[in-house]
Image: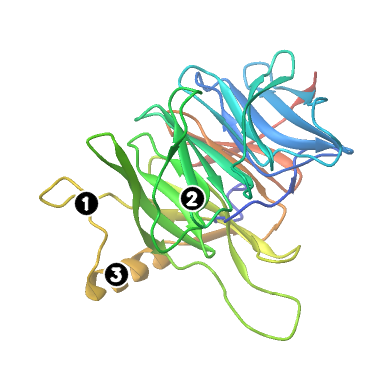
Amino acid sequence: MKPQTTPVTAVVGFVCYCFAGDCSAGDAVFSKDGKRIYGVANVGQQAAVQEIDLSKNTIRTIPLTQLSSSDWLRGITCSSENKLFCTTKGSLWSLDAQSGKLMKIRDAPMGANFWRIAYDAKSRRTFVTTDDEEHPLFMFKEESEWIPVRMRRHPYPSCLVFASTGELFFAAYGDLWHGEIQSDEGNYFSLAAYRYAPLATLESANTTPTEIGVSDIAVTRDSVYVKSSRMGGSGEGWFGRLTRPRAKRNEYGEMDLHYEPKDRLALYQKSLKSLQILSEDFRAGNLCTSPDESRLYYFLDRKHWLATNGKPEELHLREQ
């Protein structure tokens, strides 16, 4: 989101964005107390995390020297205990931001790669996505746990984001989805969700792909912000905002997935009508919201922005 002259929208999947200086990144997270922001970055050929201290208006680069020059972070999240977790292609790590030390929690399942990672403050569980069609989503509460979450029919969730209510937003096939993690007496977990907004522009042609879909998501109290970028290439995309859906419950307390066509089509019409494209800078990224969902951070036009209750202000940061 830029100052009032321009509008903003969403992104699906993992893409590299400019973060600051000679850096590229694709994910960010607020600390538990909302005073710091941690963003995935690359400095030259070295994977790194950049820490923004909002109380001091400073930015600090934390090189991750344990990783090889061919390895990079795919996602980062922060727990209610203020513990940072991050993913690379082959491993799940915890991160000590002060020292920059990574501690491996586990390797990716055999034949699979890790992608994004997200924390659900309501259930106090951390969720990790993979590219394995059979087991695309896992979760843990204690680091020794590793529990599969079943996702039927659509096995490639991307850029998961949990609201404070436990509602889940994610991208699939370039579209924006809304749902929740359901459990059967705490022993069996599954994802229940529906497509909230058909935002992908799909095509088939004997050319370089021009398809664009959601590649990053952030959820505030009233809105869902998305970055949309090219699927299968570089360049092209936009940053925007939609009205946040309100979960409806059935008689059993489960989320209403809007099964009937008359409900689903009306839903699409309503969500798309609320869409505002705030910028067409395809390099926008690092979307994340504060734990109380009042503040949105993002990187746009090579500048750092912080929007409080929808009002954006550029952050003028000093290197630390």
Give the image location of residue 2, x and y in percent. 62, 48
In this rendered view, identify the residue nearer to me: 256 or 153. Answer: 153
**Separation of residues labelled 2 and 1 (CA atoms):** 28 Å
For residue 226, side relative to residue 210 (left or right): left
Task: Of the two numbered discs 3 and 2 on the same chain, state the one appearing first in sequence.
Answer: 2
Residue 264 disc label? 3
Residue type, mark 2 in image: His
Give the image location of residue 41, x and y in percent. 75, 36
User: How many numbered tags mark residues here?
Assistant: 3
Q: SS at mark 1?
A: loop
Residue type, mark 1 in image: Lys
- The answer, for residue 151, to whether it is visible in the render is yes
- The answer, for residue 219, to whether it is visible in the render is no
Task: Of the two numbered discs 1 and 3 on the same chain, state the one appearing first in sequence.
Answer: 1
Q: How crowded is the residue under tag 1: few (<14 C-alpha within 10 Å), some, or many (20+)?
A: few
In this rendered view, identify the residue nearer to me: 65 or 49. Answer: 65
Give the image location of residue 12, x and y in percent. 57, 56
Q: Quadrant of the C terminus?
A: top right
Which one is in front in this view, the residue at disc 2 or the one at disc 1?
2
Residue type, mark 3 in image: Arg
Q: Please report the residue visible at 40 percent of the width from the left and 54 percent of the height from the top.
A: 151
Q: Which residue is mark 1?
A: 248
